[in-house]
Amino acid sequence: MSDFFKSASVPRLDAAAQKEAVMNSIRSEIALVNAQELMNKTNEKCFAKCVLKPGTSLSSSEETCLARCMDRYMEAFNVVSRSYTQRISKESNQMREGTL
Amino acid sequence: MDQFHFDDATKKEISTFLEREQAQARINNQIQSFTSMCWDKCITGTPGSRFARGEEACLANCVERFLDSSLFMVGQIQQQQQQLQRAQGASS
């Protein structure tokens, strides 16, 4: 009787499912940190570019600027990401050829 | 991680997974800091509805040249060290 409860209460259910859960929570944690960092940077850069003299409220031209700036910053992130990734794969190919 | 009762194979798999994720996170951090630095260098005007002429190319060049600069300076330091060693070898 007690043995039955013991084996039932320990969630041995599915090690694979537990593993997946751990990995997924790590993945989403990293993605969240990344998105937050990108948001902070975008805000910092676009505030500097678009809100030159802060008034009592955001003007419509400031808002237009902020919206465009956000799009451009994300685009810049993608351009940088692409050329950095290409560079990394180029250099790791060279290293591999060098050792062969 | 002990709360999960993983067997050794699973533990190993998770630690490999962690290493890979950490490497990817480091690359992502680099991309964030390059974007910030190259944005300041390349995007000089008010942001428009698309990149101005040359801005996109400037961003790509910025990353490449930053990495070139880093490699160049490592090379310089290595050369200086070799020269120093040669000078020491000659004097002794």
Image (tube, grey):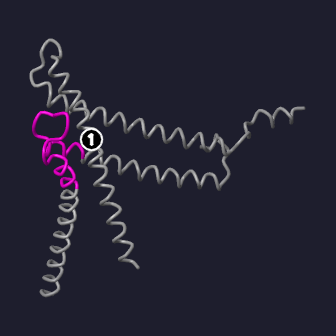
| Residue A7 position in % (x across, y down) | 81, 37
| Residue B84 position in % (x across, y down) | 15, 77
In what quadrant of the picture does the C terminus of chain B appear?
bottom left
> Would residue A44 be found to the left or right of residue A92 on screen?
left
Q: Which of the 4 image quarters holds residue B49? A: top left
Residue at 15% from the left image edge and 46% from the top image edge:
B55
| Residue A31 position in % (x across, y down) | 42, 39
Question: Residue at label 1?
Answer: A75
In the rendered image, residue B50 lying in the magenta stretch gets the answer yes
In the rendered image, residue A66 lying in the magenta stretch gets the answer no
**Disc 1 residue type (three-letter):** Glu
> Would residue A57 be found to the left or right of residue A20 on screen?
left
Q: Mark 1: few, some, or many residues within 10 Å (few <14, many ≥20)? A: some
Q: Which of the 4 image quarters holds residue B91? A: bottom left
Which residue in the rendered view is the most extreme toward the right? A1
Which residue in the rendered view is the most extreme toward the top? A56
- Badge 1 marks a residue whose secondary structure is helix
First to last magenta residue range: B35-63
> Would residue B31 be found to the left or right of residue A59 on screen?
right
As displayed, is residue A65 above or below residue B92? Answer: above
Q: Nearer the viewer, residue A90 or A13?
A: A90
Residue at 24% from the left image edge and 45% from the top image edge:
B35
Residue at 35% from the left image edge and 71% from the top image edge:
A95
Q: Nearer the viewer, residue A82 or B81?
A: A82
Q: Which of the 4 image quarters holds residue B50? A: top left
How many numbered marks appear? 1
Q: Nearer the viewer, residue B91 or A62?
A: A62
As displayed, is residue B54 above or below residue A40? Answer: below
As displayed, is residue B86 above or below residue B25? Answer: below
State which chain disc 1 sits on: A
In what quadrant of the picture does the N terminus of chain B appear?
top right
Residue at 16% from the left image edge and 69% from the top image edge:
B76
